Amino acid sequence: MSRQQLFSAFFFAVFLFLLVQVYALFSLFLVPLIWAVIFVLTFYPLFTLLLTWCQGRRNLSSLLMTVLVVLLVAVPVFLFTSVLTSEALALYQRTLEATQSGELQQFLASWRETYLGQLWQKWGPQIAAFDIDVPGLALQGANAASQFIAGQATGIARNLFVFLFDFLIMSFSLFFLFRDGEGLYITLRDLIPMEPEHKDQVFQRFYETVSAVVQGVVATAVAQGALVGLAFWGLGVPFSLFFAFAAALASFQPIGGAAVIWLPCVFYLGLAGSWGKALILLGYGVLAISGADNILKPLIIGGRTKLPTIFLFFGMLGGLEAYGFLGIFLGPVVLATIVAFVNIYREEYTHQVAEL
């Protein structure tokens, strides 16, 4: 080994060791830092416009933009959390009272008087061989759901300090990323050993994917939450505001989405004998609520990232499993970055392989 090779090996070994140590130092703050980067990339066009209005004063522009983003994030989050927690506890108390007073058991037993119950009585002798206790199963499901809601509310209170800590770190980082983010981007870009046009292609795909996923997911959540709340309020379903917020939260999930909120209500209305309302909600849910997800996400995310819908679905689902809630945004970013590298490889290296 030559002297130059020895120095190179030593340099990269120490450099790798230092990178591991830097990761250990920043691992506690990694999640809020990633969220800060996501918000900066999403709102950077607005920051550029604000910077022009402030005549290039980056400190003032960064401060104003940070306050704006914090308000846009903090107000809906705290409103969402407070309403969801209070409504969930009220729903839990109502379910508990109905269970203890026997009201829930009477409701579940009254289903035999409905059209569905009459069908059950008609085919009961054949089905009885399977020993299925539908009212008992429904009661167990209601108890499990109420206990789950109470457990989630307790978990939110227990993790409040962690949430506030992460939110503070994210808010603190926003100012410096808005102010110094362009310089950090140029430094990182210069360190990558690729052709300039390839760097532009990769970073452009990264930026487009982040902003498109954030806008698509948030727009879908708001739309589905509003549609569910409007439908439940119009049909007289209790706790419509709670279910609207729950549907918005559920819409972030790649599988099921808001359907896990409105579809059980269809069965609830059917058991209550309101078949007209149940059919209206079923049609409305399939066409309007689920249609919003099927239209907005492919239109906003797929149209800008140029990723097939099936890739987006598995990217979000796999990201959710790998990185938690943050993976809903990181999964498509990873896929889009890989597509950019594949395109570079196809443009630069496939002809060389063919010549060999």
Image: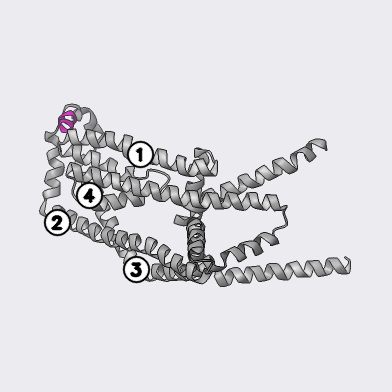
Depth check, mark 3 against mark 1: the one in front is 1
Depth order, front residue of 242/318: 242
Relative vertical location of residue 33 with respect to residue 235 in this rendering, above or below: below
Relative vertical location of residue 233 with respect to residue 179 in this rendering, above or below: above
Q: Is residue 104 left or right of residue 334?
A: left
User: In terms of secondary structure, where does tag 1 sit?
Assistant: helix
**On the image, numbered disc 4 is attached to which residue?**
240
Q: Which residues are magenta?
A: 115-121
Q: Main secondary structure of the magenta part?
A: helix
**On the image, numbered disc 1 is attached to which residue?**
290
Which quadrant holds residue 68?
A: bottom left
Which quadrant: the N terminus?
bottom right
Asked if marks 2 and 3 touch (Cβ < 8 Å), the reply is no
Q: Which residue: 70% across, 53% down?
A: 196
Residue 54, percent from left and from top:
49, 66
Disc 2 to disc 1, how far (Cα)?
33 Å
Disc 4 to disc 1, how far (Cα)?
18 Å
